[in-house]
Image: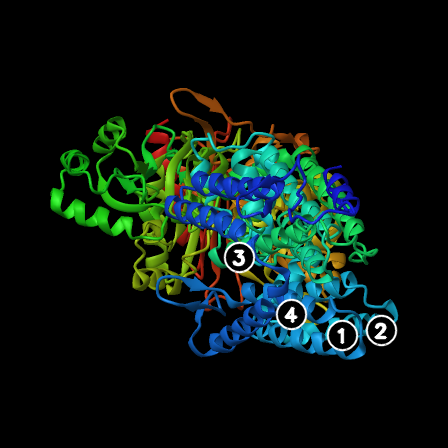
């Protein structure tokens, strides 16, 4: 309306016929008349001031006081310069165009020679007091030169000469490299050509060339520029990649809401994550600080400038003035569109500022000058002599108002999009913001102890606490805080001050500075010194060392495989790596706590965040008896040493429940070797030792069971009645079959089943196996637990192997009749562990198969019993009397006769298993016994690999364990 009123005054203001005096007219209601006779548009001045003011608010919110002062000074000076430039005559534009253009080109030429390089781009000239960005000056220079060339009318020569002049600064800017500014200048050239009403037909080749050359731009892009494009195209928001700026812009806009977060106590920290928040991402930053309303105010102020410049282009008398006003409108609109779109992640990150709002002296100066030229152009239309004839119909810049309408609609849509981001993705992006600025220090839970049945500690935590300091949170310059810390930890204050100073320079989130006793750690925790954390030691003590090495296992830092199995496991968590430590890790480990801190973008802690206290792990009580364990270990070690065997295993178990009372594995590793700091030489010595010290010989070393398996064959006969137990079978020194001779361990006379078990008569069991056949033996053996895991609560149990015609064929072997013969005495394709032997021995004695279990209960002050599997009754339990009679005869007068000296009765079976793979060529020594015979309580099974005769080598081990049990019943 104002513009129409002004144009009405201009169009209908012809003087009367007789008028001879001179005076000037100006719009009476919308423009201020100054003594010099020039007119200022208050809308332009006000909008420019609003942009400068909003820029000041953004800088003040960011804590950039010096930048704010400089921005304010430049803004005030720019407003004055803008007003002064309004006096410029249109006729001076020609000289001004060439001056600005040539100055820009000269400065661009100087940049590669003496320019400053910032972030990989050489764009600045340091003039001492000030720094100048010539590419910004080039925008105005190119615009003015195009106006000078094209405002006088179209000709082929003028068009192409103007484009040639414009190409020079575009090319120079592109080589800096500053492709976004070069693209803006090129776009400004095209807009100006359109505004100048150059016929569209000659423009088609230009547009065609521009479109065709776009793919070629990719060839000159730097890697970081390609990363930006790829990040934009893929929507990637990698915190360490090119999508970082886009992510921070989204977060800032989403977090700002309508009224901003400047009052948030953590605003400074949150704002520090927005890169170039004073320049490239100033729009996102002001929304973050002062809300979406401030962002809309920026858009509104830009639109006022664009519209007033566009309207001014229709009020001028000269084509030069019209084109300069329309060109400035295009320049402001183009800057605002690209910058705000990039802030909203609708365009790739370009680094283009919003005129007058974003921080930058050169940019602000150039745009204040441009607005001054708009005012001068406007003055050209409002200020003319009364006697001047009415101007002929003018050719206004093409599509100036249409472009303003489109820009208004676009920026309005962007405002809506910003609101949509806040509404639809606000919670998600605020959560992302919280996560990116938060780091949590794991507070390890104190691991539970492992104790024997009497409470004796078998695995404990070392009596020490670790003192950690968080850089940035501990007041390192505070001598009182240092003195308090030194007094509590009993360390010299000077040494602690040096340690804290080193911590402050560390890039780590927290650093250990001292190790103290637990009671000292408790006092330090109660002192609540800022930035000081007290953590329990994660180092374990194993008092019995190698006596229980494979059984207890050890702990270590969780591996990627551990974390994949347990997604809640934190990086660096200490977990059980073997044995019971691994099996019951979830109970022993407890729940880690967290001390979270807010960090700066470089990762340095800035403020304390939330804290979750750790929940200590629970203690584990075992069925195992430490004293019996020592007896078993010592007896087994003596047996191995005296026999020349290389390894052995022994297990004592409650025959009624499966509770493991002792479990010896010799030789074994000392799990204290795995406690940090690890001695590599000691560790290598443990791992390279003979006798497989790293493996549990009770559950992980299967070998042929020898004659201990004869009672399984006897049980099969009890089920299938192939040979009546009381039938006397001729035996002798050997048995021949198909040209092969199978020896007895000594010549023997005829035996029935009881005597054959007592004397371990091989020939009897050769013949019995042939009568039964391998399938029947295997069926009974499977029910007794052979060929499958026993279910003991330890990781990595070996199931052994139960050979049958089918199972041997499956592994690529052949079953012969001789294989059945050997199966009768526990040889051939048959391997078991001492656990298997203990299970079938106790099973035959009690009529039930139990599940071996080491752990009894868990808890802290009170304990909860662990669930155990109920014993499984054998289907043939009522048919086992002949077998038990033979086992009792073995213990009283047979191969296990040494047990007859015990004060209680027992049933037993010995075994001597030949094995070609034995390291020393000697057979494996086996011995299994259950006592008392009438009401079984305990089963003991032991073997020594390469130990010779079972009764001679393993018998004393079983006897020693049973003696201890009897003495301590």
Q: Is residue 117 visible?
A: yes
Q: Which residue is mark 1?
A: 159
Instruction: Please state which of the two labelled residues, at mark 1 or mark 3, is closer to the viewer.
Output: 1
Q: CA distance from mark 4 to mark 2?
A: 20 Å
**What's the mark number on residue 202?**
2
Please tell me whether mark 3 sits on a helix, a strand or a loop: helix
**What's the mark number on residue 145?**
4
Q: CA distance from mark 2 to mark 3?
A: 33 Å
Q: CA distance from mark 2 to mark 1?
A: 9 Å
Left or right: residue 896 versus residue 326 is left
- Picture quadrant of residue 90: bottom right
Q: Are marks 1 and 3 in contact (CB under 8 Å)?
A: no
Q: Which residue is mark 3?
A: 363
Q: Are marks 2 and 1 in contact (CB under 8 Å)?
A: yes
Measuring 73% from the left and 63% from the top, which residue is drawn there? 192
In this view, 258 is above or below 466 = above
* Residue 141 or residue 598, whichever sits in front: 141
- Picture quadrant of residue 43: top right
**Quadrant into which the N terminus falls:** top right
**Quadrant into which the C terminus falls:** top left
- Picture quadrant of residue 531: top left
Instruction: Please state which of the two labelled residues, at mark 4 or mark 2, is closer to the viewer.
Output: 4
Q: Is residue 566 visible?
A: no
């Amino acid at each position: 309306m104002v513009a129409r009123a002004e144009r009405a005054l201009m169009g209908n203001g012809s003087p009367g016929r007789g008028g001879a005096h001179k005076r000037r007219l100006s719009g009476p209601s919308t423009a201020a008349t100054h003594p010099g006779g020039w007119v200022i548009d208050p809308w332009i001045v006000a909008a420019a001031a609003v942009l400068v003011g909003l820029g000041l608010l953004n800088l003040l919110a960011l804590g950039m006081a010096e930048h704010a002062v400089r921005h304010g000074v430049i803004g005030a000076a720019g407003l004055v310069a803008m007003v002064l430039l309004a006096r410029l005559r249109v006729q001076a534009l020609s000289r001004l165009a060439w001056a600005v253009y040539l100055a820009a080109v000269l400065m661009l030429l100087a940049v590669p020679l003496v320019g400053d390089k910032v972030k990989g781009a050489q764009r600045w000239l340091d003039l001492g007091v000030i720094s100048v960005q010539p590419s910004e000056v080039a925008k105005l220079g190119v615009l003015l030169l195009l106006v000078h060339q094209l405002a006088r009318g179209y000709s082929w020569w003028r068009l192409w000469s103007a484009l040639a002049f414009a190409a020079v600064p575009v090319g120079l800017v592109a080589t800096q490299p500053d492709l976004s500014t070069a693209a803006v200048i090129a776009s400004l050239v095209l807009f100006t050509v359109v505004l100048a009403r150059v016929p569209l037909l000659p423009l088609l080749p230009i547009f065609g060339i521009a479109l065709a050359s776009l793919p070629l731009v990719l060839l000159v892009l730097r890697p970081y520029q390609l990363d930006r494009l790829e990040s934009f195209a893929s929507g990637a928001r990698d915190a360490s990649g090119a999508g970082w700026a886009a992510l921070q812009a989204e977060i800032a806009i989403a977090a700002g809401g309508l009224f901003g977060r400047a009052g948030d106590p953590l605003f400074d920290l949150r704002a520090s994550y927005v890169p170039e928040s004073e320049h490239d991402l100033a729009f996102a930053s002001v929304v973050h600080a002062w809300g979406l309303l401030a962002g809309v105010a920026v858009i509104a102020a830009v639109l006022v400038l664009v519209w007033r410049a566009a309207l001014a282009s229709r009020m001028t008398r000269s084509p030069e003035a019209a084109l300069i006003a329309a060109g400035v409108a295009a320049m402001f609109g183009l800057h605002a569109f690209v910058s705000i779109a990039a802030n909203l992640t609708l365009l790739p990150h370009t680094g283009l500022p919003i005129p007058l709002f974003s921080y930058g002296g050169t940019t602000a100066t150039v745009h204040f000058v441009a607005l001054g030229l708009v005012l001068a152009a406007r003055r050209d239309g409002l200020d003319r002599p009364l006697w001047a004839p009415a101007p002929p119909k003018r050719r206004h810049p093409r599509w100036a108002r249409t472009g303003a309408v489109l820009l208004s609609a676009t920026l309005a849509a962007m405002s809506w999009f910003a609101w949509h981001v806040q509404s639809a993705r606000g919670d998600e992006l605020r959560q992302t913001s919280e996560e990116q600025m938060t780091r949590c220090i794991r507070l390890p839970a104190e691991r539970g102890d492992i104790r024997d049945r009497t409470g004796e500690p078998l695995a404990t935590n070392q009596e020490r606490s670790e003192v950690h300091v968080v850089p940035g949170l501990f007041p390192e310059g505070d001598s009182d805080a240092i003195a308090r810390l030194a007094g509590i930890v009993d360390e010299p204050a000077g040494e602690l001050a040096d340690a804290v100073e080193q911590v402050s320079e560390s890039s780590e989130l927290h650093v250990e500075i001292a190790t103290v006793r637990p009671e000292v750690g408790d006092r330090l925790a109660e002192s609540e010194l800022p930035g000081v954390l007290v953590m329990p030691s994660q180092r374990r003590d194993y008092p019995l060392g190698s006596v229980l090495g494979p059984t207890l296992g050890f702990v270590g830092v969780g591996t990627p495989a551990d974390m994949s199995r347990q997604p809640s496991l934190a990086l660096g968590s200490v977990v059980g790596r073997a044995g019971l430590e691994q099996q019951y890790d979830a109970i022993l480990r407890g729940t880690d706590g967290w001390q979270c801190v807010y960090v700066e973008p470089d990762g340095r802690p800035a403020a304390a965040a939330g804290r979750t206290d750790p929940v200590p792990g629970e203690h584990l009580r075992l069925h195992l008896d430490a004293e019996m364990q020592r007896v078993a270990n010592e007896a087994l070690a003596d047996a191995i040493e005296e026999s020349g065997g290389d390894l052995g295993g022994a297990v004592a178990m409650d025959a009624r429940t499966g509770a493991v009372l002792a479990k010896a594995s010799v030789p074994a590793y000392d799990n204290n070797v795995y406690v940090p700091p690890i001695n590599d030489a000691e560790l290598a010595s443990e791992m390279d030792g003979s006798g497989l010290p790293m493996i549990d010989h009770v559950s992980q070393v299967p070998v042929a069971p020898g004659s201990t398996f004869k009672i399984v064959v006897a049980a099969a006969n009890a089920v299938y009645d192939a040979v009546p137990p009381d039938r006397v079978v001729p035996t002798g020194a050997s048995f021949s079959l198909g040209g092969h001779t199978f020896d007895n361990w000594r010549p023997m006379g005829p035996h029935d089943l009881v005597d054959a078990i007592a004397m371990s008569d091989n020939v009897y069991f050769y013949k019995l196996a042939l009568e039964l056949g391998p399938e029947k033996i295997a069926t009974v053996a499977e029910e007794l637990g052979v060929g499958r895991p026993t279910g003991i609560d330890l990781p990595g149990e070996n199931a052994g192997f139960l050979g049958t015609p089918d199972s041997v064929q499956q592994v690529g072997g052949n079953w012969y009749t001789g294989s059945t013969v050997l199966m009768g005495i526990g040889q051939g394709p048959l391997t078991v562990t001492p656990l298997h032997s203990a299970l079938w021995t106790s099973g035959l004695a009690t009529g039930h198969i139990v599940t071996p279990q080491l752990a009894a209960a868990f808890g802290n002050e009170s304990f909860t019993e662990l669930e155990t599997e109920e014993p499984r009754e054998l289907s043939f339990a009522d048919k086992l009397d002949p077998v038990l009679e033979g086992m009792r005869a073995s213990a009283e007068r047979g191969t296990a006769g040494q047990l007859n000296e015990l004060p209680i009765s027992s049933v037993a079976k010995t075994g001597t298993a030949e094995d070609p793979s034995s390291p020393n060529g000697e057979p494996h020594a086996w011995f299994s016994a259950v006592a008392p015979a009438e009401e079984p309580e305990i089963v003991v099974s032991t073997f020594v690999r390469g130990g010779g005769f079972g009764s001679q080598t393993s018998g004393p081990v079983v006897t020693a364990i049973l003696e201890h049990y009897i003495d301590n019943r």
